[in-house]
Image: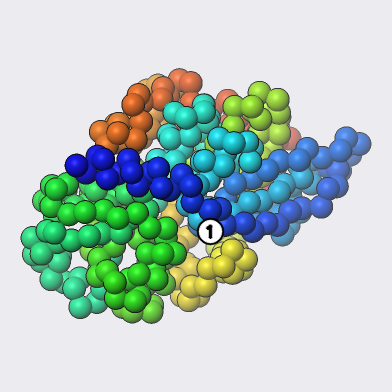
Amino acid sequence: MMRHRYIKALAALATSSVLAAAFSAPAVAAPGDDKAPVKIRIAQQPQRWGLEWYIATQKGWWKQVGLDPVMSTFSSGAPEIAAGASGSWDVGGAGNIPSVLGASRYGLQTIGLADGEAAIISIMATKDKADAYAKNPALLKGKTIPVTTNSTGHWGAAVCLEKKFGLKPDDYRFVNLSPSEINAAVNSGRYDVAQVWAPNTYILESTIGAKVICTGADVGLPITSNLFVTPAFAKENPDAVAKFLAVYLRAVAWQRANPKEAEAYLGAFFKSVGVNIPPEYLARELRDRPAYTLAEQLKIFDGGEKSQMADWWMQVSKFMESVGVVRKIPSVKDHVTNKYLLMIQNDPKLKAFAENTGD
């Protein structure tokens, strides 16, 4: 019964409308390069990992490697993946569940990690219910719990309810809502428990005093957001893919060296995509959603089908298979690659660019 409801929710989500917002760097050739910049369409969400592209745009790093980015913002992973299947974007980021779904549907290739998210994928409850639910999980039986299906949030919620609270799938009902819809519904009192991820957790905490009662970290889930490329763009523009990844990694290196400035940029980025959170949460957001440097990513991706990344891929894929989202687990060999990380590592100039902590 749960499986039928879940599949029905996925079908509804596939027709979700896309939130559009864009910013782009000027179409200027890279210094010393007389070629026109390569246009690259980037899919993002109003999430912490979009910060890297925002910083790169503000500092003009795209043109330094000969790229002309056009950004599109999506509410969550499912509508983003649906748009990728129709050729609406070339590269992007999303949670590991959408990444696997894109691999299954049209060969999407994961090329890097956007950030770690186990600590911010949460179940929240309203201030008056949180302690009671935490102490007596049986009170959650029969509850309707809003989740954003086909997301890492759904995975985190399902495992939290099973492992931390001892509930079976038939003990509760999931209903599919977008993150903004969940915020509105909890704020209005329609639901007193919900699956939420940052920065929405901060909004509910600051506005109505909602509390986190479980996170993905509590139950040991390897939740990440991933960076990926469509197979068509990867085939036609491998150098552009490596440069796109290098820009992301440079922003990560810069943030490590400039944490306070990174907080200010994060606040500006969130405002640019319509998210307003109190400034005191910005440092927590960066702390709880770590991004990975070139050296760290190379280590995580090293080993092919025996890599740490492969293990994380298989864990989320098995969950998706168990609930009928994918019929067959997409192979690590065909859909997870360190090719572009190695291209950066083996190109002295691009490696120096990716590891540059200066402006």
Q: Quadrant of the C terminus?
A: bottom right
| Image side of residue 149 versus residue 292, left or right | left
Please name the residue shown 17% across and 54% down the image: 172
| Image side of residue 328 versus residue 344, left or right | left
Task: Using the rendered image of the protein, determine whether residue 299 is visible from the camera's viewpoint.
Answer: no
- Image quadrant of residue 223? top left
In the picture of the structure, the residue carrying the numbered disc 1 is 46
Residue 125: percent from the left, percent from the top?
25, 68
Q: Quadrant of the N terminus?
A: top left
Task: State the SS at label 1.
Answer: loop
Please name the residue shown 64% across and 27% down the image: 232
- Image quadrant of residue 304? top left
> Going by the picture, which residue comes out furthest to the right?
34
Residue 120: percent from the left, percent from the top?
36, 57
Residue 358: percent from the left, percent from the top?
69, 54
Task: Using the rendered image of the protein, determine whether residue 238 is visible from the camera's viewpoint.
Answer: yes
Please name the residue shown 50% across and 55% down the image: 75
**Identity of the amino acid at label 1?**
Pro
